Image (cartoon, rainbow, N blue to C red):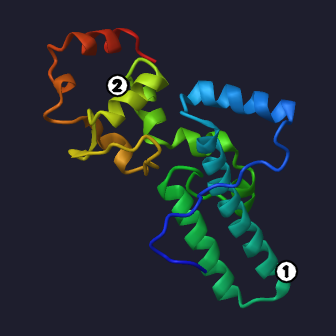
Amino acid sequence: MGYPGKNHKQYQSPKRRFEKVRIEDERTIAITFGLRNKQEIWRAIHILRRHRQGARDILAMVSGGVDEARVEARRQELLQHLERYALVSPGATIDNVLSLKVNHILERRLQTIVYRQGLARSPKQARQLINHGHIAINDRRVSIPGYMVSRVEEDQISYYQTSSLAKESNPERGRINNVRV
């Protein structure tokens, strides 16, 4: 099992290292979402795999004859978790979980949401603003671009109180607002 305090790799690198189609797809995803490196894509793929594996486990429990109450509890737990992060809509089914793509996971990152809300001119600038401490969620500074934003927190994203961008008179803020998404 290993020492629990030690950091472990949160992703799995591709088995075929030089697959041209995969490399091109990852490149377009990295440019679209302003990611630092391919490991961030692989982390999103790992998260997606865990959710899809949970959905397949539930389907296996149904066909395996496991107690119906236990299966329903697992299904509700998985769907509520995905609804909380706006990955599936309310009233979704297991089929909706199995149809999720990597883009759905990457859309829920703080970096992407800051860009989509118009607080930054580009995904790269959104990453920079987050790293430099200009972005806050519910008046608390968040400096992790890969932070998964829940549905409730999405409306609470703004500039940090003491940030220079929080002032309306900041010239950079005027440039950002003119380039609305």
Give the mark nearer the N terminus: 1 vs 2: 1
Query: Measured along the vertical axis of the image, is residue 176 above or below residue 89?
Result: above
Q: From the top left corner, tell me how far across and down residue 155 is, in percent.
A: 34, 41
Amino acid type shown at disc 1? Ser
Q: Mark 1 or mark 2: which is in front?
A: 2
Amino acid type shown at disc 2? Leu
Q: From the top left corner, tell me how far across and down residue 129 is, in percent.
A: 33, 29
Instruction: Tell me: 85 left or right of 180.
Output: right
**Quadrant location of the N terminus?**
bottom right
Task: Name the residue tied to disc 2.
Answer: 119
Residue under the point 62% across and 77% down: 74
Label 2 SS:
loop
Q: Quadrant of residue 175?
A: top left
Of the pair 28 and 63, the residue shown nearer to us:
28
Neighbor class of circle 1 (other Cα within 10 Å; few <14, some 14-19, many 20+) is few
- Residue 63: mark in rendering: 1
Of the pair 144 and 18, the residue shown nearer to us:
18
- Residue 165: mark in rendering: none
Q: From the top left corner, tell me how far across and down residue 116 is, in percent.
A: 45, 28
